[in-house]
């Protein structure tokens, strides 16, 4: 158990819909990262937040957005969903925002868009 | 981030040492080597990381060559539960401008055989 929690575990929704994925980092960690893993793309970095502020963006679509709240949990919002958005979404956390800190990953949310 | 090259798959007999190689010939002086593994569709699990000295923890050992162009992850006594995809990642000593994310490649699929 990494200490990072993600909800829900599974999500099935239809094209065009909007969903919210939630992540709680390990106690004491200030950074949260979101990654997407699909069959054809592997693990792709989406976005990083540190202590409530966005710090880095990766391959995140404009239809996707995220935020980190004062209690440090984070939410990833996916809108206008397409079939290709079906994937595993992982959240990770680290104690620092920049530097060589290991990241600890949650169990993921499996999103299926039908 | 420096690119890494790993064999796509390897087998190892249960109880024997598993030696997973990684080439990172373009690594620069301040880039760390990280190893993660992913068991089935679970969240990636941190194993170990290092800069230039060999490192050991309760899970594994990391051997980095003197020129730092390659490294080997050693699982001393492989068990069936070590069957997973192992990712070797090298990452720059990051700054706020570049973020702290990891770039995962395709990894090595290790199968531990009874």
Image (tube, rainbow, N blue to C red):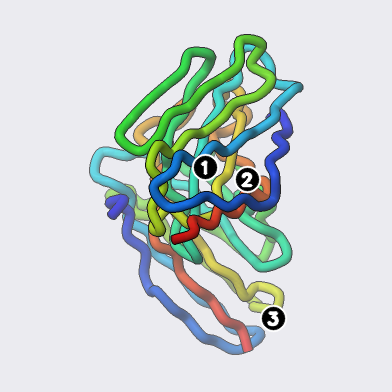
Query: Residue beneath label 1, please?
Result: A54
Name the chain letter of the residue that bears numbered label 1.
A
Most extreme residue toward the left is A27
State left or right for residue A52 relative to residue B111.
Answer: left
Compared with B19, A112 (above or below) is below
Q: Residue at x 28, y 50 (%)?
A: A71
Which image quarter holds the C terminus of chain A? Answer: bottom right
State left or right for residue B17 relative to residue A65.
Answer: left
Total marks in image? 3
Q: Nearer the viewer, mark 1 or mark 3?
A: 3
Q: Nearer the viewer, mark 1 or mark 2?
A: 2
Name the chain letter of the residue that bears numbered label 3.
A
Nearer to us in this view, A71 or A38: A38
* Label 2 packing within 10 angstroms: few (<14), some (14-19), many (20+): some
In x, y percent, where is residue A59? 69, 52
State left or right for residue A56 relative to residue A84.
Answer: left
Q: Residue at x 54, y 67 (%)?
A: A88
**Label for residue A83?**
3
Query: Residue beneath label 2, please?
Result: B104
In x, y percent, where is residue A10? 44, 78
Which numbered disc, 1 or 3, marks the residue that appears first in the sequence? 1
Residue B82 shows up from this direction? yes
């Amino acid at each position: 158990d990494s200490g990072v929690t993600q909800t829900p575990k599974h999500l099935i929704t239809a094209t065009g819909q909007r969903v919210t994925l939630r992540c709680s980092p390990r106690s004491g960690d200030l950074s949260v990262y979101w990654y997407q893993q699909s069959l054809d793309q592997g693990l792709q970095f989406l976005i990083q937040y540190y202590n409530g502020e966005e710090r880095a963006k990766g391959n995140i679509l404009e239809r996707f957005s995220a935020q980190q709240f004062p209690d440090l949990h984070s939410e990833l919002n996916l809108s206008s969903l397409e079939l290709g958005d079906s994937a595993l979404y992982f959240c990770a956390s680290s104690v620092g925002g920049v530097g060589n800190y290991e990241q600890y990953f949650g169990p993921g949310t499996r999103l299926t868009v039908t | 981030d420096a690119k890494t090259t790993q064999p796509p798959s390897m087998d190892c007999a249960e109880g024997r040492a598993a030696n997973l190689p990684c080439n990172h010939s373009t690594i620069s002086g301040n880039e760390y080597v990280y190893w993660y593994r992913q068991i089935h569709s679970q969240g990636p699990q941190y194993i170990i990381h290092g800069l230039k000295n060999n490192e050991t923890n309760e899970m594994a050992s990391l051997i980095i060559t003197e020129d730092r162009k390659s490294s080997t992850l050693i699982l001393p006594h492989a068990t069936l539960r070590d069957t997973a995809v192992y990712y070797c990642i090298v990452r720059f000593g990051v700054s706020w401008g570049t973020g702290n994310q990891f770039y995962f490649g395709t990894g090595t699929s290790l199968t531990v055989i009874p």
